[in-house]
Amino acid sequence: MSNTILSIDQGTTSSRAFLIDHDLNVKGQGQHEFRQIYPKSGWVEHDPEEIWMSTLAAIRDCLAKAKTDPKNIVGIGITNQRETTVLWDKKTGKPIYNAIVWQDRRTTERCEQLKKDGLEKEIRKKTGLVLDPYFSATKIGWLLEHHKGDLAFGTVDSFLLWRLTGGVVHATDATNASRTLLMDLQKCEWDDELCDLFHIPKNILPKICSCSEIYGTTKNVAGLPDGIPIAGMAGDQQAALIGQACFEEGEAKCTYGTGSFILMHIGEAPQLSKHGLITTLAYKIGNQIAYAFEGSAFIAGAAVQWLRDGLKIIKQASDVEALASQVPDSGGVVFVPALTGLGAPHWNPNARGTITGITRGTTAAHIARAALEGIAFSQYDILEAMIHDVGKSLTVLKVDGGACKNNLLMQFQSDILQVPISRPRMVETTVLGAAFLAGLATGVWKDLNDIKKSWREEKHFTPRMKNEEVKVRVEKWEKILGRSF
């Protein structure tokens, strides 16, 4: 147990903690949910104290299940929901307001005004991001309009680091900083002009560090001894890329959760997408910096949840594969899962879900199969945009997240992409990525090659569908997709 990493995954609905060793054995794990707060339509908040308490509870349960002395932990890694914004008092360490969550849309008007002022092009050039309330800058601005004092800003990683170190360290990592609209993507530094544009004083911002270094050590944390190094941090999707050992240009991963996120490693220099993607930092490890294209679909597993909760044709999400497998195909039914608009590469918030091709012979099984195929087609659209941007075909797509356990979905994904799909033994890749980063800084893993050797494939899917059929299916999808706008 002397080479054990405590990996904290602070997510949107729960906080989790895992104990992982060099051979990727999970020695213990814990999970605690917390409240979702909706003060007004389009507003989404979390209580930072509840985030902290749920994190402590997850750590406590993890250690209890592992039945290990916490003194054996050699390092702590953190991965987190990105963009979510916390402001706290520097003297007391107490939050001055609830955390404003990445999903929150309260600053839409502010973003629209900045677009009208013609500022989006310059912002995108510096940050790689689109001008949207999704990111942190306008959230910080809103908080500062309503609260004054000697304040500190942080995304959730930074807030947890402050608490874990007893208020000693105010820092973030470069991946989380890259999601604020305030960091120069090439320099990995806070940008003076952007800070002025969004009216953010630089003295409230955390220090930007790499993803793998010793930021500080634990101090006065319930259940943990003082002196454990906090040694790795990355936003959840970047952590998944690292957890999938995607360290070479052109390698890509897709995380299938409520929505889906595809990141493709694009090398050591940032590029701006011409096909509806954003550019983000993949990781910074030592002096090595890597960038990625990112595309997200708003609906993936949520389509299956809708079949369960809305149509009630399945009792639990895991039933969808068995239902869809009752028929050889969707029977001509096409399901565009634009239940909350369309994300990358279309970016159409007004698009709506569409189901076409229903006949008297259509059954629940056909609709279930069409839903799975719609999830796969959404990834097809994103990856086609990526391939056009980089000018190279994908050789393999690594997958993770809950829905990647669905073999029918993964096989169809491979078919429609005409690309092999690789599913790892450990699909908790966000947790694994945070562990890898902390382990690199504390000597559990020697280097990125050592991490590659640790990664293991569980199942490989290869295309079975003929090119002619793929072409017909894609053309039909694109036709129906256009009707959802």
Image (cartoon, rainbow, N blue to C red):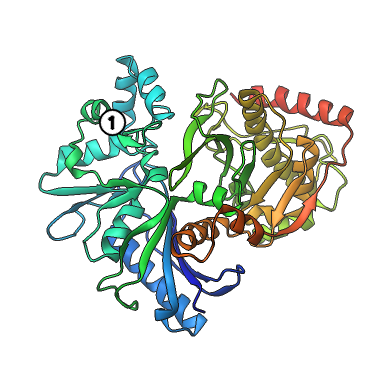
Amino acid residing under circle 1: Asp
Residue positioned 39% across, 48% down in the render? 210
How many labels sit on residues? Answer: 1
Residue positioned 55% across, 20% down in the render? 274
Q: Residue 179 is drawn in which quadrant?
A: top left
* Residue 133 position in % (x across, y down): 36, 34
* Residue 217 position in % (x across, y down): 31, 66
Q: Is residue 311 visible?
A: no
* Residue 429 position in % (x across, y down): 57, 56
- In the figure, is residue 333 to the left or right of 20? right
Q: Nearer the viewer, residue 21 or 309?
A: 21
Q: Nearer the viewer, residue 161 or 323?
A: 161
Q: Which residue is mark 1?
A: 191
* Residue 381 position in % (x across, y down): 66, 30
**In the picture, which quadrant includes the C terminus?**
top right
* 42 lies above or below 155: above
